[in-house]
Amino acid sequence: MESEKELLKDLIVDVGSTEVRIALQENHRLIELNTESISGRSFTVGDVYLGKVKKVMPALNAAFVDIGDEKEAFVHYLDLGLYFSSFDEFVRRTNSNTNSKDLYSQIKIGPILEKEGRIENVLKKDQMIIAQIVKEPISTKGSRLTAEISLAGRNIVLLPFAEKVSISQKISSKEEKRRLETLVKSILPKNYGAIIRTAAEGKNAAVLVSELKSLIGKWEASWEKLEKSKAVQPLFSEYSKTTTILRDLLNDSFSNVYVNSEHEFNDIKKYISLISPEQEKIVKLYEGKEPIFDHFEVTRQIKSSFGKVVPLKQGAYLVIESTEALNVVDVNSGIRAKTTDQEDNTYEVNRYAAEEIARQLRLRDMGGIVIVDFIDMESGEHRNELYKYMCELMSEDRAKHNVLPLTKFGLMQITRHRVRPATEINTTETCPVCHGTGKITSSLLIDEQIERRLSYYVTDKEIKNFTLKVSPILGAYLSRGLINSYLGKWKRKYKCKINLVEVTDFSVLQNEFYTEKGDKLDS
């Protein structure tokens, strides 16, 4: 039972006014944290654009492309794909007077792009191309593009202007491979190819047909934009990060998906009913008054996990430093009690550290080169066992990675594919009350300030029902005492209802009034 318990996963989705935060927990422990902007255009892996070639660079055998970002995107000749000529012909010939569906099926696939070809023979300045983001803008670099478009589903990856159907090597049964290949080939329209993913194993025809129709519909819906305008524009976006995580990770070990927005709840439920109908019941709408990340202890874990110093068991800790090209992790035993001999104790601390490092790489989405300075171990057997253990821990990581054995200095090198900027959360902040001076209003006066505002809302605004959000420390101060608490006095004095909600994100004396409907009163 214990091994099953360790596999249980919960997805917590916090929909705010400007962004959606998505936390993946494994056995109530935060493993991944993703953020998705609601307002404004973001350039995300999987998004497809109609771009304009700005500069052709023969020396790099690559080109810079305008996709609407302030930083020009980059495409290498080898990323144009085998059948770039078919995509190019489709872009050139599509206009408001053509039937794009007929045109698409009439275009001949090929000729295949030469492997040793030159970019200047294929792309010209101001040429319009369809391109997909494979790496998000990081630091001073723009997005990395491919012109080989793919639309990923849970069971199938659709490939426009392709001919073959490939099958995941992880499907071992030859009979199942034949079944899936025959099925998918029979339902694929002309000029489409596909990759059958591992998740498709055992799925019935109805599920695969439904998903394939959805992917084809998404690709063909983008043609309307091409017909209307040949300007730089987004053609379609990857699914939301929530559905992308579910697409890649959803399996029997998923226990719950909690979301605090009814609209998002319906979208997620609809998506799961498409890719895995039997798991539709795991999606649950969170309607509690406490913020969803506080309720599931995500906020507390974020604050304890994103600092420079990350605590481990029994006094040991990690120190994490990041630069543009390199991430360094130092393992320290701290004040940990040496209950066994030195070598065994060191090996045990290093194993704890390996578990946390594997988690931190996913949590912060750290990429590039990672150097880990483990505590020195004399035993070659221990060094080898630690290397194997780290490889085992990293096997759960979806990002491409490579782990090298420990050097004689106790250093381990890890490379991890980086497709988006690392997640950085500053766990220190300037106090909004004292503004860094180190002095705040006396707590003896804070109750007077709150009461003045309460009096104004009750007498002038005639509001009688409030939610008062405060920090846990201020909450304890205002509610101490069963009868003579400040909260009790105010309720009796002003004949009003006050629902006190403690918010862990608030600073010491921060407080906000809300109406019964949840509208914020403070300006």
Image (cartoon, helix red, strand yellow):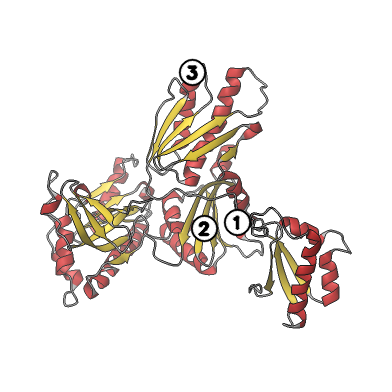
| Disc 1 residue type (three-letter) | Phe
* Numbered tag placed on residue 21 in the rendering: 2
Contact between labelled residues 1 and 2, with CB atoms less than 8 Å apart: yes
Q: Which mark is residue 134?
A: none
Badge 2: residue crowd in 10 Å (few <14, some 14–19, many ≥20):
some
Q: Is residue 95 left or right of residue 472?
A: left
Say whether residue 113 is left or right of residue 305: left
- Between the residue at mark 2 and the residue at mark 3, the CA separation in whole angstroms equals 42 Å
User: Which residue is denoted by mark 3 in the rendering?
Assistant: 381
Q: Which residue is mark 1?
A: 293
Question: Would you place residue 464 above or below residue 470 in this image?
Answer: below
Task: Please tell me which of labels 2 and 1 falls first in the chain.
Answer: 2
Dot 3: element: helix
Dot 2: element: strand
Seen at 63% across and 34% down, the residue is: 313
Pinpoint residue 286: horizontal percent, then vertical percent.
60, 62
Q: Quadrant of residue 45?
A: bottom left
Q: Is residue 196 visible?
A: yes
Q: Nearer the viewer, mark 2 or mark 3?
A: 2
Residue found at the very far right of the displayed protein: 483
Quadrant location of the C terminus in the rendered image? bottom right
Q: Position of residue 469 (x, y in %)?
A: 69, 65
Residue sitting at 71 percent across and 62 percent down?
Answer: 470
Mark toward the start of the polypeptide (1 vs 3): 1
Three-letter amino acid code of the residue under disc 2? Arg
Quadrant showing the N terminus:
top right
Disc 3 residue crowd, few under 14, some 14–19, many 20+, Cα 10 Å: few
Find residue 219 and report its image quarter: bottom left
Q: CA distance from mark 1 to mark 3?
A: 42 Å
In the image, 226: left or right of 494? Answer: left
Tell me if I can see residue 188 in this picture. Answer: no
